Image: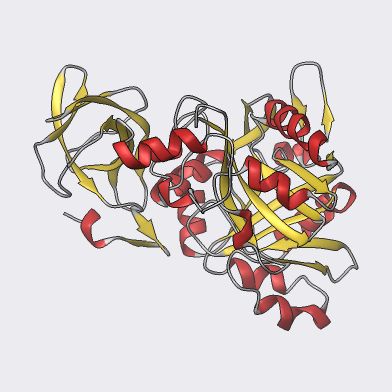
Amino acid sequence: MTSTTATRHTVLNAHHRALGAKMVDFGGWDMPIHYGSQIDEHHLVRQSAGMFDVSHMTVIDLRGPRTRELLRLLMANSIDKLKKPGKALYSCMLNERGGVIDDLIIYFIAEDFFRLVSNASTRDKDLAWIERHAKAFDVSVDERADFGLIAVQGPQARDRVIELLDPAERERIGKLPKFSFTQTRGSDGTDIFIARTGYTGEDGFELVLPESATVSTWQALLDAGVKPAGLGARDTLRLEAGMNLYGQDMDEDVTPYQAALGWTVSLDEGRDFIGRDVLERQHRDGAGWQMIALVMDDRGVLRHGQKVLTDLGDGEILSGTFSPTLGKGIAFARVPAGEIALGRAGNVRADIRGKEVPLRVVKFPFVRDGQAQPDVLD
């Protein structure tokens, strides 16, 4: 990636501009918010295939015989769930207060080689935290700024990508299970680290490849009919899919239990990870706050920072948007912990410019595999 004193640019920056993208500053990166219509790009991913430049994300390679020991300490989820190379794990990395330093994906390449992909906005603190603890385990920490990343997502995404691979690789990659990865090559011989993961709630691949091959791969996908999508659609897609956004739905003062991420916490016997004592206490006594999913059947849009009123006390909207798939306002909110019945209109309200608007509490996610979940529909 290249950079200026003000912002950083991915290797695809000029291509975004040539395609007419509206560019915005995103965590210090000059990134496309949309290429004309955020709504169209959202539907494109839900119905066929779209691709995102995610080269701003941070790739970190950890190497050394004691790498697994380091990850046992750093991660709230248990790295020992990764028993065979080629598998991936989602986890939060916590501070001593149990707050989320970052959420990331861990790829098990070999017993002495794990790869992390973390958020762009947390790059500096992630690297500093990992390096601080890696010294005691003699683990090398290598940021791979020489890589580009492209996410291809949607019901047709895998077929579109597989068509561009070496013919000898296509059948094997077509059988790659979800949350797995492997090394493969494009039809032009490009080495590609390919993972069946994503941030949209749709099937697809995330490609990690040499920066020198990122532009040609992007162009090959364009030529194959895969259209680009920007960060705007990525945000509405992930919210519909019930996926958190770091810095908005969670941060260093929020624990996984307060961010509806208790399913990522492994209180496995005999493993002492950073923040465990806090999580054990919250697991036993309650976390004080909880994150819930909300639907607004009235017209309007739910926005970050709006007050949420419940029978248990007030909370606030974290991520909120108009859902293109549902045609309704949806949101995550953090409210006092306790029993809040699903689907009961009237007991949860949003304060929108002084007017109390009824909301429905529903289960995560709002949308799965392109379809609205039953309790989301009124």
- Position above or below: 218 against 96: below
Query: Can residue 258 be seen at all in this image of the molecule?
Result: no
Residue 251 as seen in the image, left or right of residue 121: left
* Front residue of 171 and 111: 111
Quadrant (top left/top right/bottom left/bottom right) for the N terminus = top right
Q: Where is residue 97 in the image (x, y as percent from the top left)?
A: 50, 26
Q: Position of residue 291 (x, y in %)?
A: 33, 38
Residue 364 as seen in the image, left or right of residue 91: left
- Position above or below: 224 against 349: below
Residue at 28%, 52% in the rendered image: 363
* Front residue of 73 and 227: 73
Residue 372 as seen in the image, left or right of residue 188: left
* Front residue of 281 and 86: 281
Residue at 63%, 54% in the rendered image: 79
Q: Where is residue 51 in the image (x, y as percent from the top left)?
A: 63, 54
Residue at 85%, 41% in the rendered image: 138
Query: Can residue 300 be seen at all in this image of the molecule?
Result: yes
* Front residue of 275 and 167: 275
- Position above or below: 311 against 188: above
